[in-house]
Amino acid sequence: GLLARTIYNNKLTNCLVIGVFAGKSTFAVATALKAIGRGNVDACDAWLPSASAVGQEGKDAEWWKTLDHEAIYNIFMEKRTKYGLEQFITVHRMTNRELYPLVKNKVYDYAEIDGNHGEEDCTFDVEHFVPLLRVGGILWADDLNWSGADKAYARLPALGMKKIGELDTGALFIKEKS
């Protein structure tokens, strides 16, 4: 897919995924790292209904609250082992706010923002994790059309990010300046 090709072709070996869920894109990133032969993806998700429902309303909030997050986490961990990706994925079972102090001094080649789409959490992700991208680094921003997330993503140009491609409801950006 697009993400794996982007990682592989550009040799983006220091990666971050905020919002792992079942791991589809995390596995794509890690598979590309495996093909490169080196690298790591810091994969962050709390896998908790309370964290997923923050900032959501109505049916969305109810859906997140009733979803079996533990089962999704367990499936993710099983697939991580099954695909032989343990050495390429560092799992951070915590919220974005808990992760930030642990990685705030890192510099990433690639980052993905697909965590909680409430305006407050998505804005936190944009304001805290996008600055960790090196100049020339790539960002995948998912669900650009979600209410709340759209407001956070509108800040990307001010953070030196330029859109370079779109796929479904997400887009790839490159960091042109700090």
Image: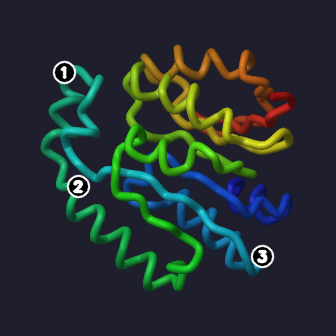
Q: Secondary structure at mark 3?
A: helix
Amino acid at the residue labelled 3: Ile
Amino acid at the residue labelled 1: Gly
Mark 2 against mark 1, which lies toward the viewer?
A: 2
Residue under label 2, please give it.
Answer: 69
Task: Determine the CA span between mark 3 and mark 2.
Answer: 31 Å
Total marks drawn?
A: 3
Q: Secondary structure at mark 1?
A: helix
Q: Position of residue 40 (x, y in %)?
A: 63, 67
Residue 75: numbered disc: none
Instruction: Tell me which label, 3 or 1, sits earlier in the chain.
Output: 3
Q: Residue 164 appears in which quarter of the rendering?
A: top right
Kindly identify the residue that appears in the image at 13 percent across and 44 percent down: 66
Kindly identify the residue that appears in the image at 63 percent across and 63 percent down: 29
Q: Secondary structure at mark 2?
A: helix
Q: For the C terminus, which image quadrant?
A: top right
Residue under label 3, please give it.
Answer: 36
Task: Determine the CA span between mark 3 and mark 1.
Answer: 44 Å
Q: Residue 158 appears in which quarter of the rendering?
A: top right
Query: Local crowd at mark 3 within 10 Å, few (<14), some, or many (≥20)?
Result: some
Q: Position of residue 119 (x, y in %)?
A: 42, 19
Task: Determine the CA span between mark 2 and mark 1.
Answer: 19 Å
Left or right: 97, with 31 as reference point: left
Mark 3 against mark 1, which lies toward the viewer?
A: 3
Q: Position of residue 31 (x, y in %)?
A: 63, 73
Residue under label 1, please give it.
Answer: 58
